[in-house]
Amino acid sequence: MLRPITHDPLLAFNLIGPAFLLLAVAVAGGLFSRRAHQLYQFVRLGQPVDRLDDLPKRMEQEATVVLGQRKLLQRLGPGLMHAFIFWGFIVLLTTIVEAFAEVFQPTFAIPLFGRSGWLGLVQDIFSVLVIIGIGMALYYRKVKRPERFKGSHLEEADFILAMIFGIMLTLLFLNATRIAAGINESPARWTPVSNAIAPLFRHMSHDVQGFFERLFLWSHILLVLGFLAYIPYSKHLHIFVSELNVFFANTKARGWLRPLHIDLDRLEGGDVRLGAGTVQDLTWKEILDLYACTECGRCQSVCPAWNTGKPLSPKLIVMNLRDHLFQVGPGLVQAKRAGEPGESTPLNPEVVEDEVVWDCVTCGACMEECPVDIEHVDHIVDMRRNLVMGESRFPPEAGTLLRNLESSSNPWGQPQSSRAEWAKDLGVPVLEDGQAPEYLYWVGCAGSFDDRAKRISQAVARVLQKAGIAFAILGPRELCNGDPARRIGNEYLYQELARQNIETLTKVGARTIVVNCPHCFNTIKNEYPDFGGRFEVIHHSQLFGRLLKEGRLRLTQEVQELVAYHDPCYLGRHNGIYDQPREVLERVPGLSTTEMHRHRQRSFCCGAGGSRMWLEERIGKRINTERTEEAISTGATVLGVACPYCLIMLDDGSKAKGEAIRVLDLAQILELSAGAEPGEGEGAAGQPPAYRA
Ligand code: SF4
Ligand code: SF4
């Protein structure tokens, strides 16, 4: 058992110790609670959103992202650095409990495992790992200085690291003095690091050893309490909030957007806001996001806009919104208590410039990287919703896009009657109500109206015909799925289009919808269910993979090309489909593949998402040029895509580089290999050609 040091000089202090500790805990706890209550009040300013569904998934997120540090460990060095500190803190909670309890009862031991040899060993090892983590953090911040830290509050982070270092050092020295004084509870050999430090104190008298033992114990306790009181007031309150933020993170597909409930009566009365015009318009989860940011800059380092010289940084959006919240939050809380509207500074352009909001391609790279599951795209789309629907303020090209969608139901502004012209020589049936064959081929606007993307649609049709698949199209009854309207911020128009499409799809009795456009895939599969449209949706890469496996599609022609496959954001990051397109390519005889530096989860956008396809890129380097250069640098002869937007953007990129690389969709590559030559095919198997567009 622990033998307390009871010599006279310390006796008085030992006697007043419990009272002093209670006072210190009351002060630190009071400061902590006061701030926690204020932060909670700020969160309550936010709009309601349901984040308590799907508890098993939330627990899984907590286990993998928080405890397992999954996202941080995607980059091994910085990931280990953070994991050492995080795991160390969890283990060392036991030492904190022991230190506090010893002030009241010197012989205290945590029930069951307290003061056992193995616990001492684990505590000793993790103290050192935390110190190694701090050393690594300093190395990254002071020596490597990655660009991702640009704009972060590094001085404050240094202070916090110094506090953590102090907590670890006092713990090791506390154990060392106890070993030197012969009052250690765990055998010295189980705490090798503390044991190695102990000789520093061995030559001292028992009294001096006792003095140092108390000094380190109290320094340890006061540093822990100081940490508790300081962190919630600092920019690094993520230490206490990130676990909550991960728990409340979206559990649906990453590409899913929260629908806005649009009450037309209230809208006409002018008493409702659409989107985020002020900080009170953010949802409570979006406010929690602001607390959780660690300012690590991982989001910024992967953002295509930031990386091509545009002003958008997802990190700076979050930091600016947080600073603004802290500035206006107290006044808003007071106003809310008084039943008044409160000060409402517009978020755009006062807090986030308009240009920043329009730069986003909604690629989700920031969300993929963010270790605390901040949902940047939600913030950006909510600000766009306010700009478009509330303020009618948007780039002129966005106005053209929206007018085309309103008048022609497609972004190209082409007449609906020409929607199926791409198929006129292919014998593709157009679906009547209740006649649904096995597959409904949802073509999408790009595949219907853009000359280059039409070749994908034709290739899909020919390959399906070659495989003997019964399919049909909707022809002029297919409208834009609504994604461009939704991502540009016009939720009202999106919902109009979605409702009409859902009605049509339900009427025709669509069973499985096959799409080659990942934007259509994401919208129909993930977002239509919010409006009652529940359909089985399959991407053409998935269907082709299945047909190849089942032997229904045979590839006979060699395709002697080296293909670099580009993961479309809305297929990969937003829907987790990375393997099937690659598996399809691997089955093509003669074809070999290579990978770009940024691929799979780290793929780099083509520049078209978030309706950027229809907006001018006025600042910095073009995103499609950046991506095309990356593909060319691999030495590939073909840049493979699985999205018509990517095809258009990257083909433009290739043309700007003197057609240095061919850009082909998977369907076009399979068409070459399956020998499904243009003009071949007699319509869907078992059905007469019924083209009537
Ligand atoms: S979604 Fe993409 S473009 Fe938008 S902020 Fe995130 S990383 Fe940048
Ligand atoms: S938003 Fe996430 S990734 Fe970006 S700086 Fe903050 S914590 Fe890091």
Image (spheres, rainbow, N blue to C red):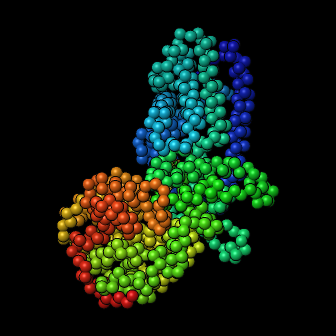
Count every numbered label the image shows and give the total.
0
Coordinates of residue 135 in the picture (x, y in percent): 48, 31
Q: Is residue 204 left or right of residue 449?
A: right
Identify which residue is drawn at 45% across, 24% down: 192
Identify which residue is drawn at 63% across, 40% down: 234
Q: Is residue 89 left or right of residue 665?
A: right
Coordinates of residue 283 in the picture (x, y in percent): 63, 59
Give the camera-side residue of 600 and 150.
150
Q: Is residue 300 left or right of residue 273?
A: left
Q: Is residue 580 visible?
A: no
Identify which residue is drawn at 23% across, 77% down: 677
Q: Quick one: quadrant of the N terminus?
A: top right
Above or below, 290 relative to 457: above
Coordinates of residue 435 in the picture (x, y in percent): 40, 87
Q: Is residue 125 left or right of residue 157?
A: left
Give the camera-side residue of 397 and 408.
397
Q: Quick one: quadrant of the C terminus?
A: bottom left
Above or below, 642 relative to 148: below
Above or below, 30 relative to 465: above
Image quadrant assignment for residue 213? top right
Q: Is residue 301 visible?
A: yes
Above or below, 644 relative to 476: above
Coordinates of residue 605 in the picture (x, y in percent): 42, 59
Give the camera-side residue of 112 and 117.
117
